[in-house]
Image: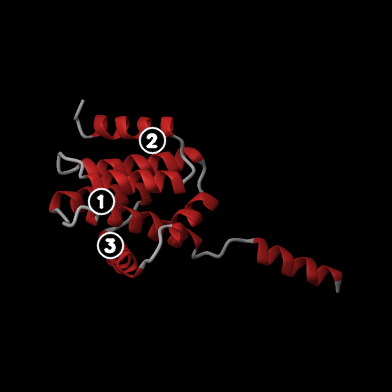
Amino acid sequence: MLKSIKKLIKKSDKKPEGGELELKLAAATLMFEVIRSDGRVDKVELIYMGEILRREFKLNEEELEELFKQAKDTAHEATSLQGFTREICDQWGSTKRMKLLEYLWMLALADDQIDPHERHLVRKVAGLLYLNEKQIVQSRERAKQQLGMQ
């Protein structure tokens, strides 16, 4: 009896296999939120987002299209960012969260200008990811370097 209870506890401690998919969707949804925060979705931003997701999560074209669709739908239905950031904070260390923030800055900078709404949203997400001001600035500077803006 005790052995079967221990087995049940061990099984419930394991993350569900869908956990990785949820993390991908959370990150993609945050990216889409940044892209649309200035009131328009530019093609260059979508291209950057696709490249980031393809590279970071090693997605094929079909998986990428499905993730895009789900992220867009999820973003339109979302009432809060906290569910997405909580999932990410629970699973990713600060280095990976900083990398996500760098990607968000890249998307905000992709059209060569940062809208105040984009800046506000990226900083809000950074706070929800428990990143400090130094990490925010470092991520923004790395994003600028990646885009050849420095």
Q: Residue at x 29, y 41 (%)?
A: 105
Report the disc number at residue 136: 2
Q: Residue at x 13, y 53 (%)?
A: 43
Looking at the rendering, in which quadrant would you find the N terminus? bottom right
Q: Dot 1 corresponds to which residue?
A: 49
Dot 1 and dot 2 residues touching (CB under 8 Å): no
Looking at the rendering, in which quadrant would you find the C terminus? top left
Give the left or right position of residue 67, taking residue 129 as reference: left
The mark that comes first in sequence, 3 or 2, is: 3
Whole-Å distance between the Cαs marked 1 and 2?
Answer: 19 Å
Towards the viewer: 81 or 70: 81
SS category of the residue bearing label 3: helix
Q: Residue at x 29, y 68 (%)?
A: 76
User: In this picture, is 148 found above or below 14?
Assistant: above
Question: Please, which residue is most extreme toward the right here?
Answer: 1
Report the disc number at residue 68: 3
User: In this picture, is 34 found above or below 126?
Assistant: below
Residue 117 visible? The answer is yes
SS category of the residue bearing label 2: helix
The percent coordinates of residue 146 (x first, y second) are: 25, 33
Question: Please, which residue is most extreme toward the bottom here?
Answer: 1
Dot 1 and dot 3 residues touching (CB under 8 Å): yes
Whole-Å distance between the Cαs marked 3 and 2?
Answer: 26 Å
Label 3 CA crowd tier, 10 Å (few <14, some 14–19, many 20+) = many
Give the left or right position of residue 34, taking residue 44 as reference: right
